Amino acid sequence: MSKNDYIPENCVWELTLKCNMNCLHCGSRAGKKRKNELSNKEALALADELINLGCKYVTLIGGEVFLYNGWEKIARRFTENGVTVNIITNGYHFGDKQVKEVTYAGLSNIALSIDGMKEKHNTIRNNSKSFDSLMKTINRLNQENIKIGVNTTLIDSNVSDLEELYTFLLDNNIKIWQLQLANPMGNFSDRKEQMISINNIKKVTSFIKQKRDEGKLKIYTGDNIGYYDENEKFIRGEPGNINYWSGCHAGLSVVGIDSVGNVKGCESLYDDIFIEGNIREESFSDIWFKDNNFAYNRKFDKSLLSGKCKDCDMGVYCRAGCRGACFFTNGNFFENAYCIYNK
């Protein structure tokens, strides 16, 4: 790819680290607000820069997005300039104030984090009231005709809930569902024994293919699930199309921004080693186009692959899959512990 090909089309932006939960798998150890998080003025200026560089899709996250005052102004700056925006929330509190904010923001959908049925969801969320609060939020969103998506983060213990959860989502007018694996970072780095097993990953890819074939809701796989098993071409992209994993796009067409303005290739790369610069010290454009930034992808060469990925016949295409999955499981960038490809 040439410099002109590097367009930050997809941005995941953590507006605040402040959160009202303490989830077992939280990759950012969210809870307390960071000191000196970006102001609305700084965030709006950054939004303008992303728009000018061709950003097309933005996901606003936390912490908990609703705890950042003015999030809806940032979202609207994007949406009124033709950018598709959604937010991810734990759905713990959703009332009249949030309805007004969401309406003003012009979101494509609200993605709720649901990690299983009531017992397992509450265990993972460390909150016995979480699931009941979610139900109230789902009912209010449906009442207001606000489109709902769901993100489910998989660990070994909640895979068994997928079938029941699927029925639950259909019964509650959910339109989009994304399944992703919990990488062992943040809180989950202390619980590596709870990481999903290879056998369960195989069950997940089969489950996704089956449900996409049913065509009752749009179901998507996260970038750290796969790769190249017999279900590969049926689990990515728009349902009904043939798609293949084409490598990690962090720093190529994907960018992550945290609440104090640090820029990384992806918000799943939650370690300081991945910080390429800070927008308070230099412009986003300077960071994005700087030589040697995002080198793990922009300067990738098959010779960098290691471990079981080194001699893989799909290595030149896969490039070891999700960069975060590699780093947080193996401590390097180019060997993937989650791969289920039988070469």
Image: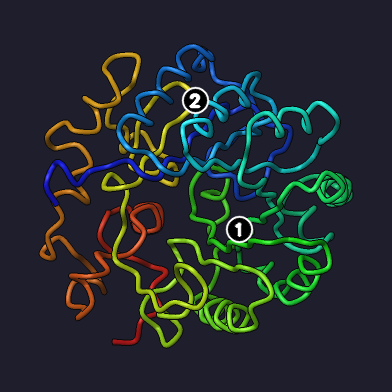
Pointer 2 local density, CA inside 10 Å: few below 14, some 14–19, many at least 20? many
Q: Decide if residue 189 is on the left or right side of residue 246.
A: right
Q: Residue at x 69, y 25 (%)?
A: 67
Q: Nearer the viewer, residue 291 or 185?
A: 291
Q: Nearer the viewer, residue 162 or 46?
A: 46
The residue pinned by badge 2 equals 259
Q: Amino acid at mark 1?
A: Thr
Pointer 1 local density, CA inside 10 Å: few below 14, some 14–19, many at least 20? many
The image shows residue 294, relative to residue 135, as above or below, that is above
The image shows residue 83, relative to residue 223, as above or below, that is above
Q: Amino acid at mark 2?
A: Ser
Marks 2 and 1 in Cβ contact (< 8 Å):
no
Q: Nearer the viewer, residue 12 or 304?
A: 12
Label 1 secondary element: strand
Q: Residue at x 81, y 68 (%)?
A: 168
Q: Earlier in the sequence, mark 2 or mark 1?
A: 1
The image shows residue 63, relative to residue 24, as above or below, that is above
Where is residue 190? Give x, y as percent. Answer: 55, 49
Which color scheme does this rendered protein use?
rainbow
Where is residue 333? Give x, y as percent. Answer: 27, 54
Q: Decide if residue 91 is on the left or right side of residue 242.
A: right
Label 2 secondary element: loop
Question: Which quadrant would the C terminus be assigned to in this image?
Answer: bottom left
The residue pinned by badge 1 equals 153
Where is residue 46? Give x, y as percent. Answer: 40, 22
Q: Residue at x 85, y 33 (%)?
A: 95
Kindly report the distance in space between the C-alpha atoms of the residues bearing marks 2 and 1.
22 Å
Where is residue 159? Give x, y as percent. Answer: 66, 72
Q: Decide if residue 71 is on the left or right side of residue 172.
A: left
Q: Residue at x 36, y 44 (%)?
A: 9
